[in-house]
Image (cartoon, rainbow, N blue to C red):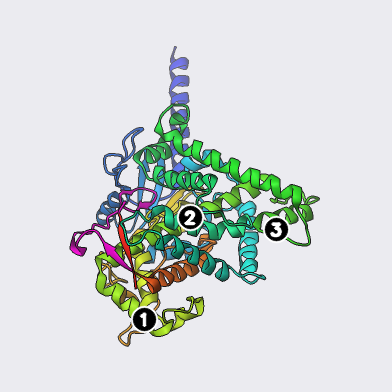
């Protein structure tokens, strides 16, 4: 009896010691995470993070816990980075450590780690290198990207003239023209503005961008392990993207049937040629799945982000007519009324350049940033981030950092001008993110924003339907993206 009691005590002591050792090892492995609110079982920090206003909620937590903190979005642990210094230290100074693509469950079910935007590791490196090179080559080819944009801008002017000064919603005018630029690169052709298939694609992209910013999408990203099996609105993103994937897959099949390796027509042809070159390489990531999904990444991002920024831009200019007037004056002085604007004009137009930068800054199209993950155990600012930790670099907090922008909540082109009226760079200007995951289409987007804005304002004045002081430029919805409000305007020929 005494032996049994002693054995029980011994085993109990052993088990207790094992628990202590296990806890110590786990603590050592986890290290000291950044501070944050105490999570509750299953719901995490949903009492502190509103799913319909995640960005504002994160800023409130920043005020309490500092620029680097930990939150639990349901059971999902995320480290949030706020302000220019913290984001730069992570994405630039420790760029390799933070170079992984984080979890975005609402899209992961479609992409499953394929395509340049959602890939990781060697797959991401191969696809990113190829995409950058190919886009650059198209920019220097027989028909440059600049020429494609200039041509599309003229089609846009023609469509705008048909409004005859009457009120209209610019949403699909802008998405059609912007989408045709990236379409000419990835598909080798533009679409007619009245093409029913084209219009259906644009509606799907517009709707999916909105759906990604709904509370339903935020809930899905938190509880995908359960919600993927349930019916409901959260499945709309999946269904829309599957339709878009089907369209791109059909384009790929058509190109495969008519491919001439000596005369590539578009991004798809270039990828197919690379697939053939590497078909004997077992570590190659050049396959049909990556082709379809990388093309979709470029097509979607190249349509929705630039067109949304232009929609915001028109709204800001109508709210600040004195800014629009100065842009008109600079266009008249540098370009005149007859010559088509060119990218080289930008160097001689510091005010217009500053206005475009300020539009992008205040538009803040993806305020939370696309999630990152650390690819190895990482020390950061005295904290320990275990490999695989998801990280939200809040780009919106950088674009509104009061240490780098004197009036962060106001539309003020002076943020990008020096005392002599010359354009000045600001290192906190990161609408395309920064570091190793910076947007592959940054150069194209910058070119489009300048050429479209100057081309439209060269020919038209923007007329709002409300007094400027009554114009509300607040996002219609703010989640993954800041969705522009719906509005109408009139275009008055100059």
Q: Is residue 1 left or right of residue 272?
A: left
Q: Position of residue 194 (x, y in %)?
A: 50, 50
Numbered label attached to residue 330 = 1
Q: Residues within 10 Å of mark 3 (few under 14, many from 20)?
A: some
Q: Is residue 174 left or right of residue 165?
A: right
The answer to whether residue 445 shows anywhere in this view is: no
Q: Is residue 390 above or below residue 264?
A: above
User: Does the stretch in magenta take in 481?
Assistant: yes
The answer to whether residue 170 shows anywhere in this view is: yes
Q: Secondary structure at mark 2?
A: helix
Numbered label attached to residue 270 = 3
Figure label count: 3
Q: Nearer the viewer, mark 1 or mark 3?
A: 1
Q: Quadrant of the N terminus?
A: top left
Residues rendered magenta in the picture: 461-487
Q: Earlier in the sequence, mark 2 or mark 1?
A: 2
Check whether the beta carbons of the residues at disc 2 and disc 3 lie within 8 A of each other.
no
Q: Is residue 202 above or below residue 412?
A: above
Q: Position of residue 159 (x, y in %)?
A: 44, 60
């Amino acid at each position: 009896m005494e032996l049994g009691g002693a054995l029980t005590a011994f085993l109990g002591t052993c088990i207790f010691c094992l628990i202590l050792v296990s806890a110590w090892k786990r603590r050592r492995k986890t290290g000291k995470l950044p501070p944050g609110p105490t999570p509750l079982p299953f719901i995490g920090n949903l009492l502190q993070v509103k799913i319909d206003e995640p960005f504002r909620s994160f800023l409130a937590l920043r005020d309490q816990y500092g620029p680097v903190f930990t939150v639990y979005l349901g059971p999902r642990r995320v480290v949030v980075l706020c302000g220019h210094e913290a984001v730069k230290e992570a994405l630039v100074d420790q760029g390799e450590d933070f170079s992984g693509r984080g979890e975005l469950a609402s899209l992961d079910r479609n992409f499953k780690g394929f395509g340049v935007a959602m890939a990781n590791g060697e797959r991401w490196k191969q696809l990113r290198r190829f995409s950058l090179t190919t886009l650059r080559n198209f920019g220097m080819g027989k028909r440059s990207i600049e020429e494609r944009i200039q041509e599309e801008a003229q089609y846009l002017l023609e469509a705008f003239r048909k409004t005859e000064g009457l009120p209209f919603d610019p949403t699909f005018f802008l998405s059609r023209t912007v989408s045709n630029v990236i379409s000419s690169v990835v598909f080798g052709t533009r679409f007619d503005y009245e093409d029913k298939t084209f219009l259906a694609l644009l509606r799907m992209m517009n709707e999916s961008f909105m759906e990604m910013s709904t509370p339903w999408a935020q809930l899905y990203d938190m509880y995908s392990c359960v919600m993927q099996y349930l019916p409901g609105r959260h499945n709309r993103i999946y269904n829309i993207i599957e339709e878009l994937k089907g369209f791109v897959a059909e384009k790929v099949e058509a190109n495969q049937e008519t491919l001439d390796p000596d005369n590539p027509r578009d991004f798809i042809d270039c990828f197919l040629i690379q697939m053939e070159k590497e078909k004997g390489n077992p570590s190659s990531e050049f396959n049909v799945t990556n082709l379809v999904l990388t093309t979709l990444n470029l097509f979607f991002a190249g349509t929705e982000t630039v067109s949304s920024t232009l929609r915001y831009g028109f709204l800001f200019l109508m709210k600040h007519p004195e800014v629009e007037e100065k842009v008109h004056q600079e266009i008249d002085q540098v370009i005149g009324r007859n010559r088509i604007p060119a990218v080289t004009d930008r160097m001689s137009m510091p005010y217009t350049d500053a206005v475009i930068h300020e539009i992008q800054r205040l538009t803040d199209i993806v305020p939370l940033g696309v999630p990152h993950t650390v690819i190895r155990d990482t020390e950061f600012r005295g904290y320990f981030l275990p490999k695989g930790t998801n990280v939200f670099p809040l780009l919106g907090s950088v674009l509104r950092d009061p240490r780098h922008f004197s009036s962060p909540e106001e539309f003020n082109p002076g943020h990008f001008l020096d005392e002599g009226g010359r354009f000045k760079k600001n290192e906190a200007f990161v609408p395309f993110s920064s570091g190793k995951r910076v947007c592959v289409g940054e150069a194209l987007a910058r070119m489009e924003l300048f050429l479209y804005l100057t081309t439209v304002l060269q020919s038209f004045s923007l007329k709002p339907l409300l007094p400027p002081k009554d114009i509300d430029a607040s996002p219609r919805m703010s989640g993954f993206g800041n969705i522009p409000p719906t509005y109408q305007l009139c275009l008055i020929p100059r």
